[in-house]
Image: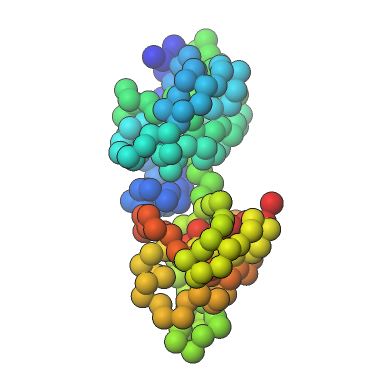
Amino acid sequence: MSLAKLFIVFAVMITAVYSLPLFNRQFNGQGTFYNVGLGACGQTNSDDEYVAALNVAQWGSPPNPNKAPFCGKKATISGPSGTVTVTIVDLCKSCKNGDMDLSPAAFSKIADLSEGRRNMYSKLLLFCIAITLLFSGSASVPLQKRLAGAATFYAVGLGACGQTNTPDQLIAAAGAGRFDSTPGICGLTATITGPKGTVTVTILDRVFNNFAVFLIVAFKS
């Protein structure tokens, strides 16, 4: 599958909705490049796109590979020749834990394709943001209770709180555990702090597949 191999040390900060043990971890791995085509995420890409395949250990075993939580996530990788941001579109079954297979275009941004093996240092960041929640708005919930969790975004519609919402609203869906254990959670507000700033949202929905995620945010585009 790979045309060449490059040793990579991955310093990783990951907030993943599917595999919580990857949260804020560092690991070692190898970087390779491969001939891109139809990927496990169900889309066809080409060698000139900045895409990558994630190793099977970190990919996990989602029921539908086309809807794997890592599909479409971004990764920023720095190497001896520079830095590149790639989109995860495939699964690398031959890659060990910590490894990543890059498209030739992406690989050429961090190292010379003709060099083969070379030591390098890389940082990988999957853009599922880390958040801090500050709940307010109900006497049944302690004010300014801080929670650590992960966030992503989703297609909004009819929510668990009984109303239909639209993508332009600043709303959120709480994790199933948080939603079910918090009386009167519908209509509460949560202040979410991420890498680029802070936003206040209203809790109007429930996450049914709660992979240890406290919140899913519907961001205004």
Along the line of sight, which residue is nearer the eye, 145 or 180? 180
The image quadrant of residue 192 is: bottom right
The residue at the point 51 percent across, 63 percent down is: 159
Q: Is residue 119 visible?
A: no
Q: Residue furthest bottom?
A: 139
On screen, 171 above or below 156?
below
The image quadrant of residue 99 is: top left
Q: Is residue 114 visible?
A: yes
Along the line of sight, which residue is nearer the eye, 198 or 189? 189
Along the line of sight, which residue is nearer the eye, 63 or 48? 63
On screen, 113 above or below 198?
above
Along the line of sight, which residue is nearer the eye, 11 or 18? 18
Task: Estimate the x, y position of residue 200 in percent, counting from the top left.
Answer: 62, 69
The residue at the point 60 percent across, 62 percent down is: 165
Answer left or right for 111 relative to 40: right
Task: Estimate the x, y position of residue 49 in percent, counting from the top left.
Answer: 60, 23
The residue at the point 45 percent across, 64 percent down is: 206
Quarter of the image for the N terminus: give it: top left
Task: Estimate the x, y position of residue 220 in percent, counting from the top left.
Answer: 67, 56
The residue at the point 56 percent across, 57 percent down is: 157
On screen, 56 above or below 216?
above
